[in-house]
Amino acid sequence: MEEKAVFTTKEAAKYLGISTTTIYRMEKRGLISSVRTPGGQRRFNREHIENYLIESQGFEAPQNPSKYKKNNLGVKEPETTYTTNHVALHTDELYFNADSIWIYNADILKVNSIKENSVDLIVTSPPYNVDIKYNSHKDTMSYNDYLSFTRDWLARCYKFIKDDGRFCLNIPLDKNKGGQQSVCADITTIAKETGFKYHSTIIWNEQNISRRTAWGSWLSAAAPYVIAPVEVIIVLYKKEWKKTSGSRKSDIAKKEFMEWTNGVWNFSGESKKRVGHPAPFPVELPRRCIKLFSFVGDTVLDPFLGSGSTLLACLETERKGIGIEIDKKYCELAKKRLLTEGKINQLKLNLTT
């Protein structure tokens, strides 16, 4: 008798040995996925479910979410932690997982789901403290508080990264909102005090010169303003610049290498309206950093995931991608971009058979 290729929710739950409620939770977190019939009913692909079971065999705890442990009172409680080679997955923080991509709905200062010394490359763009209207982050700290916050999250990242790991940090060159501040210089100093070593700075010309109306003292040396319409990417590393771990397989073309090792990058920023996030960066930025500073198969972390650009670049370049995002709305945005733009885990089912 030919095996069924497509399961109903009840059949999928029975096949996995779990409840239908657990199936819905797994689907919400991206562990498995379904398609809908014209009548709105879920259908699960047998091959996809079996792939999930195979991929989850590296977990220390059983991959079956219905497996429970007993507490001292004899009451069954769910297992909360299992591990892979690269990350420790805490089910209360895991928002989405598919293939080699993970999203955690957590605070970088408190996250428990990342192993120390497990990350090859960090690519991120933290909040700039320029009063951007995020959902869950106050972007109007005093400058001293902002630097203190920066020191704290850099210290967490230092623990996560391998000894030969790299760090590409996208920040402003400087800012004048709320007073002139040398953001790049100050954060670079803090990173070095945290333990990171400095390698270089890439200038990113977004080609976005704004139309300014406040010129200071017009045609006078009394109080002119000078504002460079660029951002920077500070390139740091932990202990050793030469990378010895990983597959040692590079996917960067000669033309790309020659162009990108020139420390001035020229490409446009991302549209807030198109992405639906107040401060997205274009996929091109992490794509360049990933191909230039990591090997195929390496683990890349973005501790301020936002709209998910870094994970899209990981998909494109065959890296393992981990994103941490404090705001659940942005976790969902990143997940949707992975499903639509990244076409991750798309099921191809013929529901007419």
Image (cartoon, helix red, strand yellow):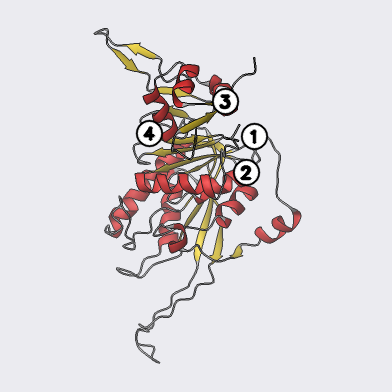
Q: Residue at x 26, y 8 (%)?
A: 72
Relative to 291, residue 60 above or below? above
Could you say where residue 325 lies in the image, as x and y percent from the top left?
39, 44
The image quarter containing residue 280 is bottom left
Could one spot residue 167 in this view of the protein?
Answer: no
Q: Secondary structure at mark 1?
A: loop
Kind of residue sitting beneath label 1? Gly
Kind of residue sitting beneath label 4? Glu
Q: Is residue 19 left or right of residue 247?
A: left
Sequence-wise, which precedes: disc 3 or disc 2? Answer: 3
Could you say where residue 131 lies in the image, as x and y percent from the top left?
31, 62
Sequence-wise, which precedes: disc 3 or disc 4? Answer: 3
Q: Quadrant of the N terminus?
A: top right
What separation in Å lies between label 3 and label 4 (alpha carbons)? 27 Å
Sequence-wise, which precedes: disc 1 or disc 3? Answer: 3
Residues packed near mark 3 inside 10 Å, few (<14), some (14 to 19) or many (20 plus): some
What separation in Å lies between label 2 and label 4 (alpha carbons)? 26 Å
Query: In the drawing, what numbered circle is on residue 93?
Result: 4
Return the residue at label 2: 294
Query: In the drawing, what numbered circle is on residue 161?
Result: none
In contact (CB < 8 Å): disc 2 and disc 4: no
Towards the viewer: 322 or 156: 322
Towards the viewer: 241 or 99: 99
Return the residue at label 3: 46
Return the residue at label 1: 246
Could you say where residue 313 lies in the image, as x and y percent from the top left?
57, 48
Could one spot residue 145 in this view of the protein?
Answer: yes
